[in-house]
Image (spheres, rainbow, N blue to C red):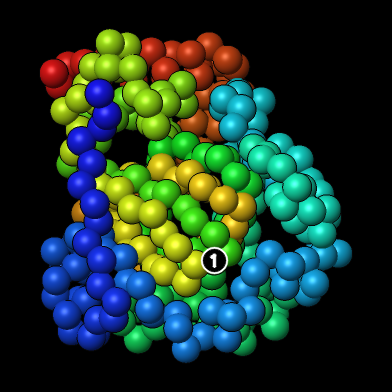
Amino acid sequence: MKLQLTEIERVKTISKADFYNHYVKKQRPVVIEELTKDWPAYDKWKLNYIKEIAGEKTVPLYDDRPVSHKDGFNEAHAEMKMSDYIDLLQSKPTNYRIFLYNLMNQVPQLKHDFKWPDIGLRLVKQLPMLFFGGENSKVFMHYDIDYSNILHFHFHGKKQCVLFAPNQTKYLYKVPHALISREDIDFDNPDFEKWPALQHAKGFICNLNHGEMLYMPEGYWHYMKYLTPGFSMSLRAFPRRIGNLSKAAYNVFVMRHFDGLMRRWKGQSWIDYKNEQAIVQTHKNI
């Protein structure tokens, strides 16, 4: 059996009013296929271009190892020169990813390659983030700490995105005091005997091609898989709903610091406890 996933709606272009009224207001995901067609990035943003202009930059890398009590919040697992990393991406599959990296600060000329979309969201101009991954590398199921509305643009290749709305959290084995589900769940081929609640979860799926944009509403869970080597950029807007704004503040100012304190105090037993509670709490809902 597979997860219950519906293809995300697609449009080639859309007006500001239609995007806001049909998707932002209703908190529904959508893929806009041609939003970047008039950007310089549409023609320029390939891996070799990034290698050319940012090859000497040292970048933080993440892999798919389980969370350890020794890791800091979003702490990188390795570092590499961007040129070496792109060579690696283009030579063979790798689990190493670049995650939430503000390359724009390091290479300001990239800012001239894209346009801030006038699409009904007040985007945070300080936070254009880039993400890179190799063939078959995966980004674990999670939601973002700040509950932002996200415009997620993909370049160079193809990427699969699986989304779940916040109301599906009860079926996703959410780890307490964290933003992730159980890391040992294979969301490509879930074991429903081991994770029976997943049979009840209803989500969305799409494959993003070069230049396409996925709108992810605030608080949506997302799991990403790079079908080919490539990279993406996210533009963000603060949550519109007061409840989500307060959850974001709690995550940033309370939750992550409490979790860090408990890791230092309890060590691996704290991680193990949270993983056990993810099962206990989820199975109460089925």
Q: Residue at x 24, y 52 (%)?
A: 7
The reply to whether residue 2 is visible in this rendering is yes
> Where residue 160 sits in the image (x, y, percent)?
42, 49
Against 2, residue 18 (above or below) is below
> Where residue 206 sits in the image (x, y, percent)?
33, 53
> Where residue 46 sits in the image (x, y, percent)?
65, 69
Q: Is residue 244 left or right of residue 257?
A: left
> Where residue 284 sits in the image (x, y, percent)?
17, 16
Query: Could you tell me which secondary element the residue under label 1 belongs to?
Result: strand
* Nearest the eye: 237 or 197: 197
* Nearest the eye: 18 or 267: 18
Q: Residue at x 23, y 85 (%)?
A: 15
Give the quarter of the figure containing the N terminus. Answer: top left
The total of numbered circles placed on residues is 1
The reply to whether residue 106 is visible in this rendering is no
Q: Is residue 282 left or right of residue 285?
A: right
Against 57, residue 15 (above or below) is below
Displayed quadrant of residue 110:
bottom right
Q: Residue at x 81, y 49 (%)?
A: 80
Q: Residue at x 75, y 47 (%)?
A: 91
Give the quarter of the figure containing the C terminus. Answer: top left
Against 65, residue 150 (above or below) is below
Q: Is residue 78 left or right of residue 259?
A: right
Would you call the spot at circle 1 few (<14 residues within 10 Å), some (14-19), or many (20 or more)? many
Q: Is residue 244 left or right of residue 276?
A: left
* Nearest the eye: 171 or 175: 171
The residue that mark 1 highlights is: 155
* Nearest the eye: 95 or 180: 95
Q: Amino acid at mark 1?
A: Phe
